[in-house]
Amino acid sequence: MDNPKTDPTGNAVKDPDDWVTGDEPMTGAQASYLKTLCEETGEEFDDGLTKADASERIETLKEKAGH
């Protein structure tokens, strides 16, 4: 287990499937960023994603957009 004092970000990265709140609706910030990425990549924006699904979609579209 990482020590949060010596590795403060070691526990900050979690698989979205492991998020306790991952099944809640995506946040406003996620929706805004996702909409921007969808516009940049020509993909369709889905406003019904969960937090976890939105996070995964953002990562996919960031790669596609070259971010």
Image: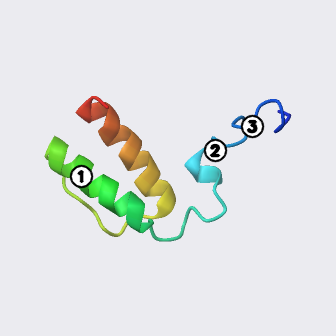
Label 2: few (<14), some (14–19) or many (≥20) C-alpha neighbours in 10 Å: few
Residue at position x 40%, y 61% in the image: 29
Residue 37 position, x and y percent, is: 25, 47
Residue at position x 53%, y 70% in the image: 24
Q: CA distance from mark 2 to mark 3?
A: 14 Å
Residue 38 position, x and y percent, is: 22, 50
Q: Establish if 30 lies above or below 37.
A: below
| Marking on residue 51 | none
Mark earlier in primary sequence (1, 3) = 3
Q: In the current view of this chain or complex, which residue is farthest to the left?
A: 42
Q: CA distance from mark 2 to mark 1?
A: 24 Å
Q: Badge 2 is on which residue?
A: 14
Q: Give the residue type at disc 3.
A: Pro
Q: Give the residue type at disc 1.
A: Thr
Residue at position x 27%, y 29% in the image: 66
Mark earlier in primary sequence (2, 1) = 2
Tag in front: 2 or 1: 1
Label 3: few (<14), some (14–19) or many (≥20) C-alpha neighbours in 10 Å: few
Left-right relation of 54 to 11: left
Residue 41 position, x and y percent, is: 18, 42
Q: Badge 3 is on which residue?
A: 8
Where residue 4 sits, quadrant-wise, is: top right
Q: Establish if 47 lies above or below 57.
A: below
Q: Secondary structure at mark 1?
A: helix
Q: Secondary structure at mark 2?
A: loop
Q: Badge 1 is on which residue?
A: 36
Left-right relation of 44 to 58: left
